Image: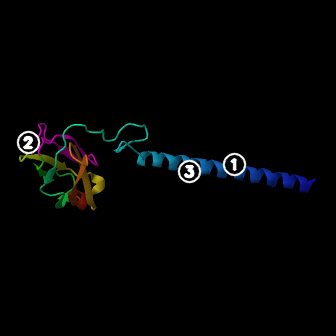
Amino acid sequence: KREKRKKKKEKKKKKKKKRREEKRREKKEKSRQGKMWIRERVEGEKEDKRGKDATPEYTGPVTSYTVNEEMHDFGEVENGSQNPFTFIITNTGDNPLVIEKAKGSCSCTVPKKPEDPIMPGESGEIEVTFKPKPSQAGKDITQVVTLTANTEPRDTKLKIKAKVQPKEEEEAQ
């Protein structure tokens, strides 16, 4: 009788283990499929999990531009300080440049884009203010500002770097 109970118990354990492994595999597969869905491209545009275009397709005239520098290094900055920098953008194409969106990778990086189109041969400014958070103190930080415009490719990434120093008061404590 004991052996029968023992065998029964072992069988139950094996079944349970097998179910757990199946669930783990299913979960892993769902995760993998979700990641693949993000990578898929529909008509050359990225889609997020909800099926919405991350960057909508642009059908108007396309142009090109140059930036005075794609990476700006602030050097050492104090935690909590306001650190402004202006990227100069020059329209090098034949059509007006329309910057639809300027988005920082973190709330500590706030870009301001020109509201009006930049005409061919003219320049515009992207003002970026970097205000480090307390959690960034003592770290080398790199933030990205993504510009979405009527260009090919649609998105351009500008970067800012800084070594965030703790405030003097924080060091004294």
Q: Is residue 113 magenta?
A: yes
Disc nearer the start of the sequence (2/3): 3
Residue 144 x/y as whole percent = 25, 52
Mark 1 or mark 2, which is nearer to you?
A: 2
The residue at the point 16 percent across, 43 percent down is 112
Task: Check disc 1 and give the amino acid type.
Answer: Arg
Report the residue marked by disc 1.
19
Report the residue marked by disc 3.
28
Please, what secondary structure does the residue beneath circle 3 have? Answer: helix
Quarter where residue 142 is shown: bottom left
The residue at the point 41 percent across, 49 percent down is 39
Q: Nearer the viewer, residue 60 or 54?
A: 60
Residue 122 x/y as whole percent = 6, 46
The residue at the point 69 percent across, 48 percent down is 19
Task: Check disc 3 and give the amino acid type.
Answer: Lys
Q: Determine which of the numbered discs, if any, sits on residue 119 in the image.
A: 2
Q: Decide: few, some or many residues near mark 1? Use Cα within 10 Å; few <14, some 14-19, many ≥20.
A: few
Question: Furthest residue to the left?
Answer: 122
- Looking at the picture, does residue 54 appear above or below residue 8? above
Task: Check disc 2 and give the amino acid type.
Answer: Met
Spatial distance from mark 3 to mark 1, Cα to Cα?
Answer: 14 Å
Q: Decide: few, some or many residues near mark 2? Use Cα within 10 Å; few <14, some 14-19, many ≥20.
A: some
Q: State which region is magenta.
A: 94-117
The residue at the point 21 percent across, 60 percent down is 162
Q: Nearer the viewer, residue 41 or 84?
A: 41
Please, what secondary structure does the residue beneath circle 1 have? Answer: helix
Spatial distance from mark 1 to mark 2, Cα to Cα?
Answer: 64 Å
Spatial distance from mark 2 to mark 3, Cα to Cα?
Answer: 50 Å
Please, what secondary structure does the residue beneath circle 2 have? Answer: loop
Question: Furthest residue to the right?
Answer: 1
Q: Decide: few, some or many residues near mark 3? Use Cα within 10 Å; few <14, some 14-19, many ≥20.
A: few
